[in-house]
Amino acid sequence: MIFLQWKKTYSLAVLFLTLCSNTVYAQLNIFACEPEWAALTRTLAGDAATVYSATSAQQDPHHIQARPSLIAKVRRADMLVCTGAELEVGWLPLLLRKSGNANIQPGQAGYFMATDHVSLLEKPSVLDRSLGDIHAAGNPHIHLDPYRIQQVARALTSRLITVDPANKLHYREHLEGFSLEWAKAITQWEKQTQTLRGKRIVVAHNNWVYLEEWLGLKRVAVLEPKPGIPPSSSHLSKVLTQLKQNPADMIVHSSYQNDKPALWLAKKTSLPVVVLPFSGADKESLIHWFDRLLGQLLSADP
């Protein structure tokens, strides 16, 4: 009798532990190529995933070394979340090849490229490497448009569910929460930045096109003679002459870029130089990053 009672109690305890274990997430290992996609993935996955960013805001995502430490991270990843559109073409294919991880190769559910899920601007009509570092699919820097980020969020949630169907409701709830908060933020940002519409900017590199389209900024000059080619003194002189005929309001470059060309031009023109964070800081949310970026643009508005 005592044995039967003990057996019943033991069975109930096992059942209780089993039910509890069903609420514990078997965390995914997710490798993000850039901080913006790491931030978005953390928001959508919550405690169902651990997310690692291969790059920081102080690095040019075009030019990264395929270090052994990155290969080790990719080897253990359940999912890869990157920009795509050839942004990582100089290093990601090598990481994938060296990793031997079949789950995150192109064509697999664990391989997610953000640019596959939105329309791209500036798709070149002619492909010629003599024109500089051009991207055949179009400009890849879509994270500077909050509306495209929302599109990517929906696609990424669907992919997370495909890879990890057991946590489907968890991912859907997180997407709903993000979407509501993101829509409110967009409304606030668009009210705050009305004064930026029509502002004329000089850019160091043509990587702000989505921000320009969203905010109504007008690009009047680029410091690089061709994408990815550092400006020579003769080219900067041409830009200076151009600005005398077609003035600008500010010079914009990202924090990881060489600031010498921008500072030289600023000295010649008295234009303010705006150094913008091209990606979020470590573990920084997308909303906080956009707040910082737009705040810096507004602080430079004459």
Image (tube, helix red, strand yellow):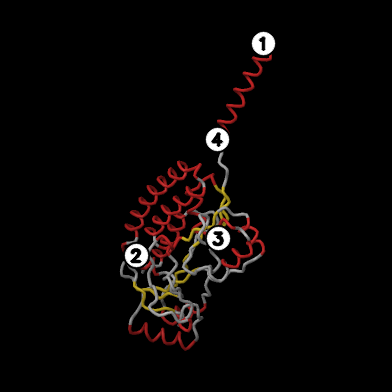
Give the farthest residue toward the right. 3
**x, y percentage for residue 43?**
48, 49
N-term-proximal mark, 2 vs 1? 1
Nearest-to-viewer mark from 2 and 4: 4
- Residue drawn at point x = 41 percent, y = 60 percent: 117
The one nearer the camera, 199 or 16, is 16
The three-letter code of the residue at mark 1 reads Met
The three-letter code of the residue at mark 4 reads Asn
Please give the label number shown on residue 215.
2
Q: Secondary structure at mark 2?
A: helix
Give above or below for 239 relative to 169: below
Q: Quadrant of the N terminus?
A: top right
The three-letter code of the residue at mark 3 reads Gln
Please give the label number shown on residue 105.
3
**x, y percentage for residue 247?**
34, 79
Q: Quadrant of the C terminus?
A: bottom left
- Residue drawn at point x = 40 percent, y = 67 percent: 300
